[in-house]
Image (cartoon, helix red, strand yellow):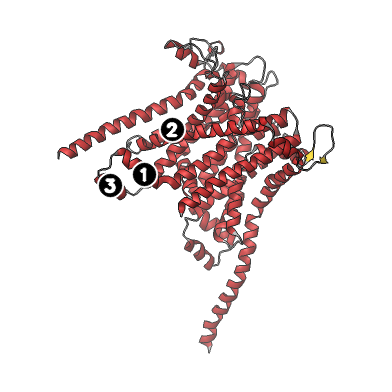
């Protein structure tokens, strides 16, 4: 009897405790996520709601807020300047992405052959990714300056005349793309290097024994196996490319004309320079939706690919 | 035997090629950075000499000009503000995201997947979209042009990605570790602090590093939300390049002041950065 009491007791306590603990777990969960949720509600969700409110109102300096329905949306959706900025963003993103992927994959394949000094080289490769984009872009702007830029001086040494790098629309977009290639290729190198390392050596050996040459191995084995990783990397980069602001702001300021006027820059100009608050808010909402559609499609692609 | 010699020969040539190309990339990609550093220690009159002066007597004059407060300039203060904002943001983000990540990994939460998707969406937000409403918000709170506004804004912007990254690390932790701590009667706070956090150090380091770099480099919010309590990048953009007569030496000194700490920091913590990059991607 004594025994059963002793043996019985812990069972009931444990039972009750685990029951109570479960309710406690939920309460603890709320308590643990609360600070993050409060901050996000106040500083992300509330501003977004405000954007939507502004986009449905007419608001410019000196005029009281007034509900105007979808008037602003109609205006933005038929605004050729806005769509041109979207087009510039898409062009800039695709060109950067393609070059970064090819160069990054090439460097990752080469890094896989390097044993001695690999760590040091990886650190050095990484540096441009970490540097302040606006400051790096200011430096590039000076390097590309028509009169006293180092680039025009260097090409002058081999007999090529000075070029207006940032004053012609084609080359200013190219300069913007190259600035991003310089900055973001390391991201691809690092992730693809890790991916290549993780491929099973047996599979690689088997393909070599099958007599596949380097290109066949790359196209039929390595790239297909790395597709999931490539898609995630592309997702990260697309999100980042779509919101590019600092580099454009300091390198070209959107110009010449609007050759490099990406959507972030367009919104900035409308709200800061033009003070069209409602209009800029509408552009912001449309831009956010476009971003979500693009990244949503990539996420969907990842899901399809996984099945 | 002949083939094996052939392969190793090809392998060696391949390796030489690999070194040549990778080193060429490193040299070319770091050349603009080295140029920036050199410009900052040239005598000011030589900064834009063409042909460039490759040999010059190094001087810190540009730095002295930059940090002198004689003309009401405040670059030193901007750097301190940057430092304060960056460190405070990193501490806050980690303090808020670690418990949230813990709850999302170990605790029962209804519609966990919905929350995770929302967090992922949050990390995709283009900052330009919330700039105007945030300007109004801080204006209404009378906190415009304060480090506080920047710290909290930066914190909110970094929480989604940080939670996501930390969760990637946390799902790798064996659940038994959590369960045994709980069976031993540890409360959640104790389980988190004494059991989970010690094995989460690499993840927290990677997350903190990303936030530090993000905060130190940030420009858009700093330009919008501050007018005198500027951060260093905003200070450069607002005071050094929009001036009529640009003092290039000073500009390069400022650029170097912003960039050099990042280079040192990157070299010091590169292992964590690489792990964070790959983890963030692989776990996605």
Q: Earlier in the sequence, mark 1 or mark 3?
A: 3
Q: As rendered, which of A241 and A56 lies closer to the eye?
A: A56
Q: Which residue is mark 2?
A: A125
Q: Is residue A263 left or right of residue A2?
A: right
**What subunit carries mark 2?**
A
Check contact, mark 1 vs mark 2: CB within 8 A: no
For the residues beneath circles 1 and 3, the answer to whether they share a chain is yes
For the residues beneath circles 2 and 3, the answer to whether they share a chain is yes
Q: Would you call the spot at circle 3 few (<14 residues within 10 Å), some (14-19), or many (20 or more)?
A: few
Give the spatial CA distance, label 2 vs label 3: 29 Å
Q: Is residue A15 visible?
A: yes
State the image coordinates of residue B33 (x, y, percent, origin top left).
49, 25
State the image coordinates of residue A204 (x, y, percent, origin top left).
30, 46
Position of residue B159 relative to residue A167, above or below, is below
State the image coordinates of residue A284 (x, y, percent, origin top left).
68, 38
Secondary structure at badge 1 equals helix
Q: As rendered, which of A268 and B215 lies closer to the eye?
A: A268
Q: Earlier in the sequence, mark 1 or mark 2?
A: 2
Q: Residue at x 80, y 37 (%)?
A: A58
Position of residue B134 relative to residue A269, above or below, is below
Secondary structure at badge 3 equals helix
Check residue A205 in the rendering and tell me which mark sits there, or answer none. Answer: 3
Check residue A222 in the rendering and tell me which mark sits there, or answer none. Answer: 1
For the residues beneath circles 1 and 2, the answer to whether they share a chain is yes
């Amino acid at each position: 009897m004594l025994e059963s009491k002793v043996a019985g007791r812990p069972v009931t306590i444990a039972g009750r405790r685990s029951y109570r603990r479960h309710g406690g777990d939920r309460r603890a969960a709320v308590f643990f996520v609360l600070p993050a949720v409060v901050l996000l509600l106040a500083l992300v969700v509330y501003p977004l709601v405000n954007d939507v409110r502004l986009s449905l109102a007419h608001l410019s300096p000196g005029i009281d807020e007034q509900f105007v329905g979808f008037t602003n949306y109609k205006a933005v959706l038929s605004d050729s300047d806005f769509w041109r900025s979207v087009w510039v963003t898409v062009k800039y993103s695709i060109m950067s992405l393609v070059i970064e992927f090819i160069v990054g994959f090439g460097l990752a394949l080469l890094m896989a052959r390097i044993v001695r000094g690999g760590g040091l080289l990886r650190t050095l490769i990484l540096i441009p990714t970490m540097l302040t984009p606006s400051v790096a872009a200011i430096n590039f702007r000076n390097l590309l300056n028509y009169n006293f830029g180092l680039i025009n001086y260097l090409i002058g040494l081999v007999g090529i005349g000075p070029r207006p790098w940032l004053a012609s629309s084609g080359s200013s977009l190219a300069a913007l793309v190259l600035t991003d290639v310089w900055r973001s290729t390391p991201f691809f190198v690092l992730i693809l290097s890790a991916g290549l390392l993780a491929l099973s050596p047996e599979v690689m050996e088997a393909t070599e024994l099958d007599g596949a040459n380097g290109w066949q191995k790359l196209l039929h084995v390595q790239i297909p196996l790395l597709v999931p990783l490539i898609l995630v990397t592309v997702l990260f980069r697309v999100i980042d490319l779509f919101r590019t602001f600092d580099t454009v702001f300091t390198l070209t300021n959107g110009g010449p004309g609007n050759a490099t006027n990406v959507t972030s820059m367009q919104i900035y100009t409308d709200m800061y320079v033009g003070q069209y608050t409602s209009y800029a808010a509408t552009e912001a909402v449309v831009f956010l939706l476009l971003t979500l559609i693009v990244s949503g499609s990539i996420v969907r692609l990842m899901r399809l690919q996984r099945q | 035997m002949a083939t094996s010699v052939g392969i190793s020969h090809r392998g060696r040539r391949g390796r030489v090629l690999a070194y040549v190309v990778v080193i060429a990339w490193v040299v070319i990609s770091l050349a603009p950075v080295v140029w920036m550093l050199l410009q900052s220690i040239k005598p000011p009159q030589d900064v834009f000499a063409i042909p460039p002066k490759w040999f010059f007597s190094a001087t810190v004059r540009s730095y002295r000009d930059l940090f002198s407060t004689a003309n009401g300039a405040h670059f030193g203060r901007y750097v301190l503000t940057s430092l304060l904002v960056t460190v405070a943001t990193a501490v806050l983000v980690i303090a808020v995201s670690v418990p949230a990540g813990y709850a999302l990994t170990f605790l029962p939460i209804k519609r966990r997947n919905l929350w995770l998707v929302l967090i992922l969406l949050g990390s995709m937000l283009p900052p330009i979209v919330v700039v105007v409403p945030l300007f109004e918000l801080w204006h209404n709170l009378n906190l415009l042009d304060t480090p506080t506004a920047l710290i909290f804004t930066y914190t909110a912007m970094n929480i989604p990605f940080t939670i996501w990254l930390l969760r990637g690390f946390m799902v790798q932790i064996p659940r038994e570790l959590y369960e045994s701590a709980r069976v031993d009667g540890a409360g959640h706070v104790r389980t988190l602090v004494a059991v989970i956090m010690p094995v989460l150090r690499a993840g927290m380091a990677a997350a903190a590093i990303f936030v530090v770099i993000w905060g130190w480099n940030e420009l858009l919010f700093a330009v919008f939300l501050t007018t005198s309590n500027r951060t260093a990048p905003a200070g450069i953009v607002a005071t050094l390049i929009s001036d009529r007569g640009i003092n290039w030496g000073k500009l390069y000194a400022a650029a170097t002041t912003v960039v050099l700490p990042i280079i040192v920091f990157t070299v010091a913590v590169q292992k964590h950065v690489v792990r964070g990059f790959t983890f963030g991607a692989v776990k996605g």
